[in-house]
Amino acid sequence: MSDSASDPTTPVEGIDTAVDAWWERALRGRPAMDRIMYAASEAANHSRLWHMLGAVQAAARRDPRAATELSVALISEAALVNGLVKTIFGRRRPAFSGQRPHTLRQPLTSSFPSGHASAAMVAAAMLSRRSRLAPAYYALAAVVALSRIHVRLHHASDVAAGIGIGAVLGAVARRLWR
């Protein structure tokens, strides 16, 4: 796999390069967008955001079962994606040598697929059960997933794969806990 952003060697790398170039022109460097995307990315580290929302939902419903199911689903997703799939692929993260506008934890795992994106989709699937806030959960999941492109910690294809894996795992988890 080529590390050169100007000379992609596969169609996927070409798409990743095009998405990143568009993102750079259209969205990065805008203070409000930077703040939102960095905050979303940081809040979702280790699925903290999703566990917190599960706890809030459990408290509002006075039923801890849904939060427990969400936590089990997220732990399972993390073990599969971060423990197995990322190890198999071992893709390098996007090269970036500039200065970030906000602080951000640099992950040690490989880039493919995005664990933030897969966890976001699992969380949205689980949190949206029997909730009128379902569109908001999925919108927040989309922001978290896309934030990983914005902060240059994932390629667009990493995020797309993470969304797909997370959608499948979320559907499986919902079936397990009807």
Image (cartoon, grey):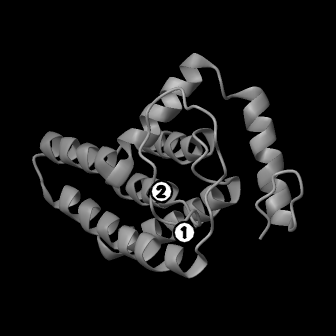
Q: Is residue 64 left or right of residue 5?
A: left
Q: Callout 1, which amino acid?
A: Ile
Q: Is residue 150 left or right of residue 135?
A: right
Which label is found at residue 121?
2
Q: Secondary structure at mark 2?
A: helix
User: Residue 126 appears in which quarter of the rendering?
Assistant: bottom left
Which residue occupies 36% across, 40% down?
43
Marks 1 and 2, how far apart at CA: 8 Å
Q: Is residue 111 left or right of residue 53?
A: right
Q: Residues within 10 Å of mark 1 (few under 14, many from 20)?
A: many
Vertical order, 84 against 153 (above or below):
below
Q: Callout 2, which amino acid?
A: Met
Decide which of tag 1 and tag 2 comes sooner along the chain: 2
Q: Secondary structure at mark 1?
A: helix
Which label is found at residue 165?
1
Q: Is residue 78 left or right of residue 162?
A: left
Which residue occupies 45% across, 55% down?
107
User: Residue 119 appears in which quarter of the rendering?
Assistant: bottom left
Which label is found at residue 110?
none
**How many numbered callouts?**
2
Q: Quadrant of the C terminus?
A: bottom left
72 or 29: which is nearer to us?
29
Q: Residues within 10 Å of mark 2 (few under 14, many from 20)?
A: many
Which residue occupies 38% across, 68% down?
78
Which residue occupies 45% across, 53% down?
120
Q: Is residue 130 visible?
A: no
Residue 14 x, y percent position in the rendering: 85, 57
Residue 149 x, y percent position in the rendering: 62, 45
Q: Is residue 169 visible?
A: yes
Residue contact between numbered discs 1 and 2, judged by CB atoms under 8 Å: yes
